[in-house]
Amino acid sequence: MKNSNEIPWPYLAGLIDGEGSIQIYKHRGTYEYRLKIGNTDLRLMQWLISNVGGKYYTETNRNKDKHKTLHQWRTTGINNTKKVLEEVVPFLVLKQEQAKILLKYFEAESTKGRELLYLKLIPLNKRGVKV
């Protein structure tokens, strides 16, 4: 990650609000997290990696006749993810509550605590449902 003062945090918050996802999910009986941004422009993935770190994946199972190639950037590591969330929270409009829940997830000491945060996040991430 670049020097924190050099990163345009409001811009990154806008990307997360508009093209991003903040998730807690179950995987093989444990709870895991994900902070990601999806976009079809590879330049954005390169910008994110050079400024914030992380990695990106390219989705190969999309219908190439109808859709552009989709790239998914993700943070890597708890410390990097926490830093990103802490910096963007004041600027988030749509996903501020999700970001705060994920920050609490990192502090949860028990599986039960993580499960409660997971359950709290589910309705906030539901598509097409007003919460």
Image (cartoon, grey):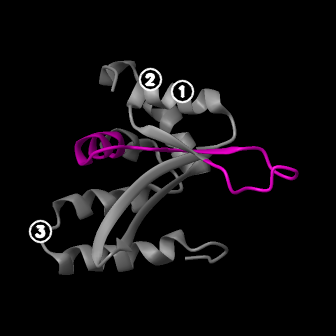
In magenta, the rendered stretch is 59-85
Q: Which of 56 and 122 is in front in this view?
A: 56
Viewer-nearest of labels 3 and 1?
1
Earlier-in-chain disc, 3 versus 1: 1
Q: How crowded is mark 2: few (under 14 residues within 10 Å), some or many (20 or more)?
A: few
The residue carrying mark 1 is 46
Compare residues 57 and 23 and report the one nearer the observer.
57
The x, y position of residue 23, in whole percent, is 43, 63
How far apart in space, not on screen, are marks 2 and 1 (Cα)?
6 Å
Which residue was labeled with disc 3? 109
Q: What element carries label 1?
A: helix
Estimate how packed mark 1 is, as few (under 14), some (14 to 19) or many (20 or more) residues with alpha carbons within 10 Å.
some
Q: Do the residues labelled 3 and 2 touch (CB within 8 Å)?
A: no
User: In the image, what residue occupies the spot 45% across and 42% down?
Assistant: 91
Task: Name the residue that disc number 2 marks.
Answer: 50
- Rendered position, 99 above or below 113: above
> Which kind of residue does numbered mark 2 sit on?
Ser
SS class of the residue under badge 2?
Answer: helix
Residue at the (45%, 29%) spot, across then down: 49
| Secondary structure of residue under mark 3 | loop
Q: In which quarter of the image is residue 77?
A: top left
Q: Residue at x 55, y 76 (%)?
A: 131
Q: Judge from the rendering whether residue 104 lies leftward or rightward of residue 25; answer left or right.
A: left
| Residue 74 counted in the magenta span | yes
Q: Which amino acid does label 1 sit on?
A: Gln
- Residue type at mark 3 is Glu
x and y percentages locating residue 3 in the rendered image: 30, 20
User: Please, is residue 33 above or below residue 84 in the view?
Assistant: below
Q: Tell me, yes or no, if residue 8 can be seen here.
A: no
Q: Nearer the viewer, mark 3 or mark 2?
A: 2
